[in-house]
Amino acid sequence: MSIVADSVVAAGRLDAASHAHPSGAHPHTADPLADARTQLAEAAGILGLPDGLHRMLATPRRELTVAVPLRLDSGETRLFTGHRVQHNFSRGPAKGGLRYSPNVSLDEVRALAMWMTWKCALLDVPYGGAKGGVAIDPRAHSTAELERLTRRYTSEILPIIGPERDIPAPDIGTDEQTMAWMMDTYSVNSGYTVPGIVTGKPIALGGSLGRASATSRGVTHVALAALAHVGLRPERSTAAVQGFGKVGADAARFLAEAGVAVEAVSDLYGAVHRAGGLDLEALSAHVRETGTVVGFPGADPIDGQALLGLDVDLLVPAAVEGVLHAGTAEAVRARVVVEGANGPTTADGDRILAERGVLVVPDILANAGGVIVSYFEWVQANQAYWWRADEVESRLEERMLNAWSHVLGYAEARGLSLRTAATALAVERVAEAHRLRGLYP
Ligand code: NAD
């Protein structure tokens, strides 16, 4: 285990450019950690944070990198690299998803962990931020291999996780089955069942009703609020959604249920478009059968990149970070962008969208529904008392809309973008926790 010293911050402002994304997977973004640090620097400037505190908040509190050997079904052994980064736990246990993707890197996980800290603070859930990742393509492995990998990764990070220390959840490439394996591995090692060790687990193991669709519901609540803010009614609005996974598919469905015509969606393999709106039920059936939106007979194929520039009112990037960058933001014609994904807009992308008058609802607000219901799940699991679906959903909606109004009010009062306002509000809460706790020793 390595406890990270505050060595990654250049004096004063952070040296964002020196942390290139090693995967090369998102060539234009290149660097979610630089984007996260730029956002923090801006908030720190607005709040007048002392330099020492700014450095602490720019640096993960604890990070663990582990080698994860996997016995393949063929009998061969392969070695993968995993990380767990705990960015901050001054307001409570660290909390954040686990990602399986070939593009996972330590810097990406650091950025995602920092955004989790701000998200939890902004939504006032009593957690800090963490994130985990294993650099593996889950589509290239059998279920048995993924189970062995998950159990080994969990045992490797066991010393730093726990229901009062750090609570993982699903993210890209992981799901409720992954969480069930993590919970079992942790419980077997503890000698008793510990349902509070993960969230996003199956209902039968103490998961919460409404968790699986919570991020997408939250995205929809703020998307409808943002459309209303710019004077658009849902039934007269159109949308495009990038990514048709756990977040994107349900967000598209809930938007359509609210009356929005979802005209285009995409996944890793391509995109489909139908003017007037897609038949999302038929599209989901097609995806269940084939594994992709490509080839859906009820729509026209379009280029995945072209989806970002469609003439729609609402664009929901719900796939990966860094897709709205200097090379794509100019083409965006949507009036509103609601970030279902974490970090889909780079610092350059943000500037260009702001210049063009596009309202961007930032990730730490827009996709916070998942961590809100994760918090509800953790509360329920710790109390062994479960709530009804309508209780979960109304509490989720209330928190999302309160946060939306709070961020909007803060932004308008100070002439800030929603992202800067949301980050400043969140950083202020974390900074206050640091001040109140003091520095030990
Ligand atoms: P997922 O693995 O379920 O789905 C990802 C989807 O994006 C898939 O359809 C995939 O094909 C598609 N995709 C990947 N790269 C793409 C590309 N370049 N262009 C278009 N599509 C692409 O993952 P998820 O859980 O839906 O997460 C999506 C995003 O939402 C991530 O940024 C994640 O961190 C964020 N997020 C997820 C949750 C959650 O509760 N699952 C909560 C908050 C934020």
Image (cartoon, rainbow, N blue to C red):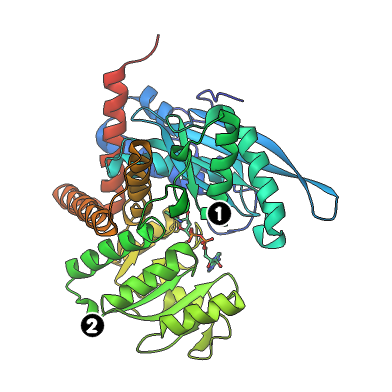
Q: Which mark is residue 236?
A: 2
Q: Is residue 207 visible?
A: yes
Quarter residue 151 falls in = top right
Q: Find residue 330 and report its horizontal and vertical position in percent.
A: 42, 70
Q: Nearer the viewer, residue 310 or 166?
A: 166
Mark 2 residue element:
helix
Query: In the rendered image, which quarter contains the N terminus?
Result: top right
Q: Is residue 42 visible?
A: no
Q: Local crowd at mark 1 within 10 Å, few (<14), some, or many (≥20)?
A: some
Report the amino acid beneath label 1. Answer: Gln
> Taking 3 as reference, is 384 above or below it?
below
Report the amino acid beneath label 2. Answer: Arg
Q: Nearer the viewer, residue 7 or 380?
A: 380
1 or 2: tag closer to the N-terminus: 1
Q: What residue is shown at x 37% (from left), y 74% (from top)?
A: 253
Q: Which mark is residue 205?
A: none
